[in-house]
Amino acid sequence: MSNRPLIAIPLPADLGHVAALLGAAAEVWQTAHGLTLTTDQLRQEEAVWGPVLALYPPAGESSWTVRITFAWTGPRQALERLGEIGTLEHLEGDEHAWTLTLSGDLGPGTDEERAGRAAWVAQDALEAQLGEALGEDADPARFFTHRSTEHLQADRHG
């Protein structure tokens, strides 16, 4: 199994469009299946485009549990959505922790590399859910401060 991505997709500066990007990436994946990029080629893509989403060959299903600690000074109603998706804890003051279990294929590599990808997906999901709860005109970054992200558990299914 290759540890090289099949294709690299540039990420927009506004990560609010990640869902559309992933849909487009799935189409690109189908047409580009079999194409691999070396690490040097991936770095060249990043040099030209900035951050890129690298699509990897399947490595099997896994579940990843991630806990994100953050400060939130925005409307408390926005936090309710997080409790519907994962486990939300109020720590003290404006500090909260959100625990989320993700399932799927996070690509090849070491457990540490896949845990890092799971943490990135969980952080993006947290910010996207807060943004959606606030509405189109609000900027969740005004109210949100990331404190830490920790990988709690991984279960391999395939």
Image (cartoon, helix red, strand yellow):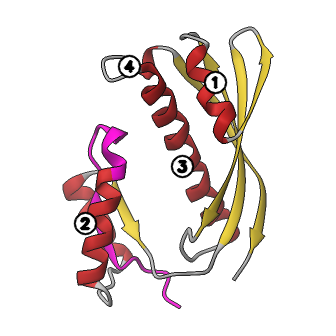
The residue lying toward the viewer, choosing from 63 and 54, is 63
Q: Which mark is residue 80?
A: 1
- Which residue position holds label 2? 44
Residue at 71% across, 23% down: 96
- Determine which quarter of the picture holds residue 154: bottom right
Task: Estimate the spatial distance between the alpha carbons at disc 1 and disc 2, rounded to whole Å.
Answer: 42 Å
Front: mark 3 or 2? 3
Question: Where is residue 109 shown, x and y percent of the image?
Answer: 59, 75
Residue occupying the far front of the picture: 84
Side (left or right) of 112 relative to 54: right
Residue at 50% across, 34% down: 129
Task: Estimate the spatial distance between the alpha carbons at disc 3 and disc 2, rounded to whole Å.
Answer: 22 Å
- Which residue position holds label 3? 120
Task: Please tell me how crowded label 3 is: few (under 14), some (14-19), or many (20+) other residues with Cα within 10 Å.
Answer: some
Quadrant that contains the C terminus: bottom right
**Do the residues bearing badges 1 and 2 touch, measured as CB atoms within 8 Å?**
no
Question: Where is residue 34 shown, x and y percent of the image?
Answer: 32, 90
Residue at 58% across, 81% down: 59
Task: Estimate the spatial distance between the alpha carbons at disc 2 and disc 4, rounded to whole Å.
Answer: 32 Å
Task: Estimate the spatial distance between the alpha carbons at disc 3 and disc 1, rounded to whole Å.
Answer: 21 Å
Task: Estimate the spatial distance between the alpha carbons at disc 1 and disc 4, rounded to whole Å.
Answer: 17 Å
Boundaries of the magenta span: 1-19
- Which residue position holds label 4? 139
Side (left or right) of 141 relative to 81: left
Task: Please tell me how crowded label 4 is: few (under 14), some (14-19), or many (20+) other residues with Cα within 10 Å.
Answer: some
Q: Earlier in the sequence, mark 3 or mark 2?
A: 2
* Mark 2: amino acid: Gln
19 relative to 78, above or below: below
Give the structural element (helix, strand or loop) at label 2: helix
138 relative to 57, above or below: above
